[in-house]
Image: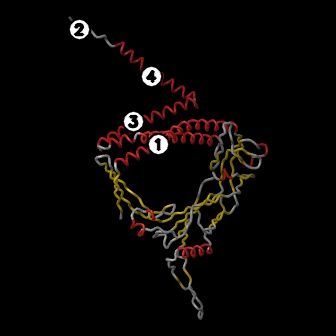
Amino acid sequence: MSYTETTNVGFFSKLGNSFSGMGMGLVLFLAGTALLWWNEGDFVATRDALNETQAQTQMVGDAKNLGPSFSGKVVHVTGFADTKQLLADTAFGVSQTAIALNRQVEIYQWVERSEEKKQKKLGGGEEIVTTYHYDKKWVSSPVDSSSFHDPQARERKANTQLIVAEDQELVASDVTFGAYRLPDFLIGSISGERPFDVKMSEEARAEMERAIFAANPHLKPIQKAPAVQEGEAPAVQASPEFVHQQGNVIYVGRSPAAPRIGDVRVTFTAVYPADISIIAKFNGTTFEKVYTSNGKSVSRLSMGIVSADHMFGKAHSSNSTWTWILRAAGIFLVIGGLKAIVAPLSVIAGVIPLLGDIVGAGTGIVCTLLGAAWSLVIISVAWLRFRPLIGGAMIAAAALLIAALYFKGRAKKAAAPAPQAPAE
């Protein structure tokens, strides 16, 4: 079942929106420019910080070799990160001895999605036809069905929730590494989540059942009579039909095989003790972040027994990858900002729909080329500022190429035969 809304937007409304969007376009353009400039400087600063840290790093090897003589030094150490701490999720009565205990909550809800079609009209107006569809899906947070566009869907597809729960991460505070304790910033970097069979206590399960029926009085629990001795009055109790356990999942609902709106699915995973490799500053009892001369923080943790060269190589690779990602983001912001700034031109030309399409396509191409060129200029100037050797070499190479093309053109012109005078 779908629901359709038709909206007519007049020429002056479109024009006003496009003019108001010019300010945001300028903000996007400036933000993209600033991001491109900062990104190049941050790449160089991070690279220099990694190189400085690598030069200072003492290769300790196994954590058993670590001692007071390394205090105050940057060390590369490998060993077993262990804990005896019991982490307990009291809301579900689940506990586990682990470095981290994670709870992921999903709710079965009605979800609204839309499809939009636009039709330009003579005179600069526009007709927008929006079709709304409704689907049942597992989502990470409750969906407010009262905001659905279809008035009937607000009643017929009203969302409920059997229990209120959110994602949660519990992290151990006492994690040992050889004879020393790991600080929180390194504990939080230990990964490797694995599922485990949950063992929800009967008390927690019964309490959750009572909470479900208290919060949802429309639900009717199945009643069953337990076996009784002859002559005793039969007792009646509610069967635990709304809380199911399977593997690392606790399912709240009548049937995991046939989910209903409001059912909740909770998945548990844990991070267990494991071998790790770290690069950090040793202070005699624990580890600290490494701060380099340019103010950058450089500390690393890898899962498993990993060499320092490999860890630094991976860090350099990650730095390069993020630089390219942020470059693309900066260029996208610059181009998007320019398109928003010139948007009124296509709106004005849109009085005649075909002309508006032509102007829109033309300004789009121009903005893309201009934005790309501007971005390259900013990156090049930033390279001159932060990487003068590379930036200077690129500009010199470009100058040589332009000079070669110029002199080649002059040579061809000189080699061309002179025009002969017409015969008398």
Q: Which residue is mark 3?
A: 366
Up the image or down, 408 lies above or below 319; here it is above
Q: Amino acid at mark 2?
A: Pro
Residue at (39%, 57%) from the top-left corner? 114
Residue occupying the point 59% across, 75% down = 206
Do callouts 3 and 1 mark residues in contact (Cβ within 8 Å)? no
Furthest residue toward right: 68
Q: Is residue 237 above or below residue 76?
A: below
The numbered dot on residue 23 is 1
Q: How far apart are labels 1 and 2 at the CA level? A: 64 Å
Structural crowding at the residue carrying mark 3, measured as other residues with C-alpha within 10 Å and reported as few (<14), some (14–19) or many (≥20): some
> Which mark is first along the chain, 1 or 3?
1
Pointer 1 with pointer 4, Cβ within 8 A: no
Q: Earlier in the sequence, mark 4 or mark 3?
A: 3
Q: Amino acid at mark 1?
A: Gly
At x 49%, y 31%, the residue is 377
Which residue in the structure is indicated by mark 2? Answer: 422
> Which mark, residue 101?
none
Amino acid type, callout 3: Val
Q: Residues within 10 Å of mark 2 (few under 14, many from 20)?
A: few
Rounded to the nearest angstrom, the CA distance separating label 1 from label 4 is: 38 Å
> Which of the labelled discs sits on residue 402, or is there none?
4
Query: First in sequence: mark 1 or mark 2?
Result: 1
Q: Position of residue 332 (x, y in %)?
A: 46, 41
Secondary structure at badge 1 equals helix
Tell me: 34 left or right of 418.
Answer: right
Side of 203 where 339 appears, left or right: left
Q: Give the CA distance from mark 2 to mark 4.
A: 37 Å
- Badge nearest the viewer, 3 or 1: 1
Q: Residue type at mark 4?
A: Ile
Q: CA distance from mark 3 to mark 1?
A: 19 Å
